[in-house]
């Protein structure tokens, strides 16, 4: 069976490395599109693909289009834009949408694709940039199972393991739960290590004890040392953590469930975005809990401003 030609929309750190991986596996990466034109041009030159300035051209040049964009608004724009979108002359094409966005937008795109004679799958990723490059992502797939079976050879090259979850929207729901729990664990670890630091404990010792007890978690393995060393190079941004915790919050509201831990975690990541820390890795939430770090300095600045304001009022 002839390998499909594959286009990419959204070639940031994840999308670009997925494209490189498929090129390594002898798939033709036919077209590349990104609002960051220099990034798209650079990747297209590297992979000998066509850089597109129109979304419709990505569809025209590809059998399969993989999208990795930031949020629901970006998804709606690339699929439903008035003058240019991926659904133009899309009959027979397959769209695999890999970003963490709401289940509702996946369902909306799935239905619209069917009306166009095309197909849409969600290929939600639970891994990071290095796994994208190595083809060792963990994928949660939703949509028509027959289309999933057709696309499995492509998805196999991107993943070390995958799980077909169910109909459109279901994989996005599961991904929202994954990120919700991960974010809560990250916030909890930051508080535990931050309090340990304030109490004067050695953080390496504390992490070793955590690893042997009920405080152990995957987040301890990936983020503990980074929190200690303030190494917040971005693998999964705090702004994305805020967005994903927000998706879970909306899902809970529809079911009339209260999720106080998720709410508290979202408020911390929202605060990071508000204070200009949103592009730090999610481990950067430790900056809000460790003594002497960002939160402490912010409080001192606020107190200083209040003191100055009070002083001016007294003089007046």
Image (tube, rainbow, N blue to C red):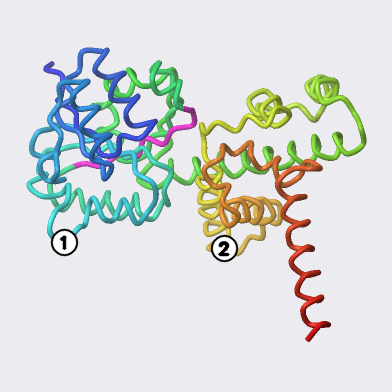
Residue 194 in which image quadrant: top right
Residue located farthest toward the bottom when viewing the structure as drawn: 316
Q: Residue at x 72, y 54 (%)?
A: 298
Dominant SS in magenta: strand
Q: Which residue is drawn at 20% across and 49% down?
A: 113
Indicate the position of residue 258 as horizontal and vertical percent values.
66, 60
Q: Nearer the viewer, residue 299 or 259?
A: 299
**Quadrant into which the C terminus falls:** bottom right
Which one is closest to the eye, mark 2 or mark 1? 1
Q: Which residue is drawn at 62% across and 42% down?
A: 183
For residue 82, which numbered disc appears in the image? 1
Q: Nearer the viewer, residue 101 or 283?
A: 283
Q: Residue at x 10, y 41 (%)?
A: 57
- Residue corresponding to mark 2: 253
> Is 127 included in the stretch rendered in magenta?
yes
Which residues are the magenta region? Answer: 119-128
Q: Is mark 2 in CB contact (under 8 Å) with mark 1?
A: no
Crowding near the residue tagged with mark 1, few <14, some 14–19, many ≥20 C-alpha atoms within 10 Å: few
């Amino acid at each position: 069976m002839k390998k499909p030609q594959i286009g990419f929309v959204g070639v940031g750190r994840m999308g670009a490395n997925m494209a490189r991986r498929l090129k390594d596996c002898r798939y033709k990466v036919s077209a590349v599109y990104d609002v960051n034109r220099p990034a798209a041009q650079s990747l297209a030159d590297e992979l000998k693909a066509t850089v597109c300035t129109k979304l419709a051209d990505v569809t025209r040049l590809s059998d399969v289009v993989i999208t990795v964009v930031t949020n629901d608004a970006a998804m709606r724009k690339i699929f439903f834009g008035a003058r240019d979108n991926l659904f133009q002359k899309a009959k027979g094409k397959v769209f695999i949408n890999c970003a963490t966005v709401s289940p509702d937008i996946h369902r909306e795109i799935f239905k619209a694709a069917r009306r166009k004679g095309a197909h849409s799958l969600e290929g939600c990723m639970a891994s990071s940039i290095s796994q994208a490059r190595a083809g060792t992502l963990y994928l949660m797939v939703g949509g028509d199972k027959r289309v999933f079976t057709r696309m499995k050879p492509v998805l196999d090259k991107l993943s070390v393991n995958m799980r077909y979850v169910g109909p459109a929207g279901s994989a996005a729901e599961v991904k929202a739960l994954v990120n919700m729990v991960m974010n809560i664990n990250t916030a909890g670890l930051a508080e535990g290590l931050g309090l340990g630091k304030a109490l004067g404990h050695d953080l390496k010792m504390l992490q070793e004890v955590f690893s042997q007890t009920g405080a152990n978690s995957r987040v301890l393995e990936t983020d503990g040392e980074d929190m200690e060393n303030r190494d917040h190079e971005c693998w999964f941004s705090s702004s994305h953590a805020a967005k994903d915790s927000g998706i879970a919050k909306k899902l809970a509201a529809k079911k009339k469930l209260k999720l106080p831990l998720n709410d508290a975690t979202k408020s911390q990541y929202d605060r990071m975005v508000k204070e200009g820390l949103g592009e730090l890795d999610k481990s950067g939430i430790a900056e809000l809990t460790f003594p002497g770090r960002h939160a402490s300095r912010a409080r001192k600045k606020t107190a200083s401003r209040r003191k100055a304001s009070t002083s001016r009022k007294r003089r007046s």
